[in-house]
């Protein structure tokens, strides 16, 4: 109030001086003083309605989801996930600060948080692919389908649509995660088995395994050995074999591969079977043992022989 009083005195003095000088100049000065003291006009930009903002940011997420059915390999799917993660992040950033009517302010905030969680879930699937925690397209898609962030985003968009803000996610049908197995000792691939050799396997590990006898780069016999179990192949023909082991969870018989927690190894030594006065018998353990004398090396999945 004190500063306003000083301003009033200044204007009063200006009017008095103008009156003393007389003429048209005084009128002009008085008019100028009145104009200076009047309220200033300012253009106020209109707020963008929440509905278009919502649609603008959800549409790229939908576009990325629509690319999922076209993915034919893990690398394809990983590329789609990269686009999807970027879209979810951008939507989160924009909706976190967007203006919204009071009636849906809380839902708008919750949606932004759900998009952030979904972005983290997408990053988690990409990390699982890199670490081979998921090693098949079906299991990677199933992991995405189990995303809590994705479920929350869909539910909140449904809630906003009921309030008059129509936007929704179109999520393609995604498989459920599976845990398929075979009976212990099941032959995945079987050669003639007309020999006299015996090959014994002790799988004391925590994952199922398929052990393959490979001759000249080609799989001759493969056997499923369940975790914590023992099994053997009888009737192995003469020859010098390499032994490959694939381990993991959820055995897909169609592709002859595990879809989760995959590991691929090869024994350094080969295994000769010779029929003479006695038959050959070999025994291996898949878990490390204190007095073990057989070393294994990791193998690139792309060069691993088909079981």
Image (spheres, helix red, strand yellow):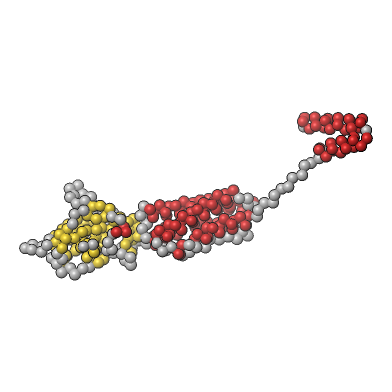
Q: Residue furthest right?
A: 23
Quick one: quadrant of the N terminus? top right
Q: Is residue 165 visible?
A: yes
Q: Quadrant of residue 49?
A: bottom right
**Residue in the image at 61% along x and 55% along y:** 53
Instruction: Please say whether residue 109 is visible from this viewpoint.
Output: no
Q: Position of residue 151 (x, y in %)?
A: 49, 57
Task: Give left or right: position of 60 versus 279.
Answer: right
Name the residue rendered at 77%, 30% in the picture.
2
Q: Nearer the viewer, residue 114 or 235?
A: 235
Query: Residue 72 at x, y = what percent?
Result: 41, 64
**Percent x, y for residue 233?**
19, 63
Dividing the picture into quarters, in which one does residue 211 lie? Answer: bottom left
Q: Nearer the viewer, residue 29 or 59?
A: 29
Please state if 151 lies on the left or on the right of 53 as rendered. Answer: left
Please name the residue shown 83% across and 39% down the image. Answer: 35
Q: Quadrant of the C terminus?
A: bottom left
Residue 116 to residue 77: above or below? above
The quadrant where residue 41 appears? top right
Q: Is 16 situated left or right of 236 in this image? A: right
Q: Nearer the viewer, residue 85 or 304?
A: 304
Residue 18 higher or lower than 120, as above or below: above
Number of marks: 0
Please name the residue shown 49% across and 60% down the image: 65
Position in image of residue 134 (x %, y %): 37, 57
């Amino acid at each position: 109030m004190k500063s306003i009083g000083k301003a009033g005195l200044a204007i009063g003095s200006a009017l008095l001086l103008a009156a003393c000088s007389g003429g048209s100049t005084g009128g002009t000065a008085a008019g100028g003083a009145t104009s200076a003291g009047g309220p200033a006009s300012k253009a106020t930009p209109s707020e963008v309605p929440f509905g278009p903002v919502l649609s603008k940011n959800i549409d790229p997420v939908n576009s990325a989801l629509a690319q999922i059915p076209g993915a034919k390999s893990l690398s394809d799917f990983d590329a789609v996930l990269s686009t999807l993660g970027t879209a979810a992040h951008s939507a989160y950033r924009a909706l976190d600060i967007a203006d919204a009517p009071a009636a849906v302010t809380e839902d708008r905030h919750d949606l932004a948080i759900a998009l952030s969680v979904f972005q983290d879930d997408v990053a988690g699937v990409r990390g699982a692919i890199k670490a081979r925690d998921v090693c098949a397209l079906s299991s990677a898609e199933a992991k995405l389908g189990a995303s809590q962030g994705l479920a929350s985003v869909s539910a909140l968009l449904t809630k906003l649509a009921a309030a008059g803000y129509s936007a929704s996610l179109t999520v393609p049908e995604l498989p459920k995660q599976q845990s398929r197995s075979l009976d212990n000792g099941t032959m995945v691939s079987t050669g003639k088995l007309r020999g006299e050799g015996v090959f014994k396997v002790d799988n004391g590990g925590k994952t199922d395994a398929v052990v393959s006898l490979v001759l000249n780069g080609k799989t001759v016999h493969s056997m499923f050995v369940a975790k914590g179990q023992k099994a053997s192949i009888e009737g192995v023909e003469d020859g010098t074999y390499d032994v490959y082991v694939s381990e993991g969870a959820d055995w897909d018989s169609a592709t002859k591969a595990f879809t989760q927690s995959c590991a691929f190894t090869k024994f350094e030594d080969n295994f000769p079977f010779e029929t003479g006065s006695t038959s050959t018998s070999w025994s291996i353990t898949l878990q490390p043992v204190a007095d073990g004398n057989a070393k294994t090396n990791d193998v690139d999945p792309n060069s691993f022989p088909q079981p």
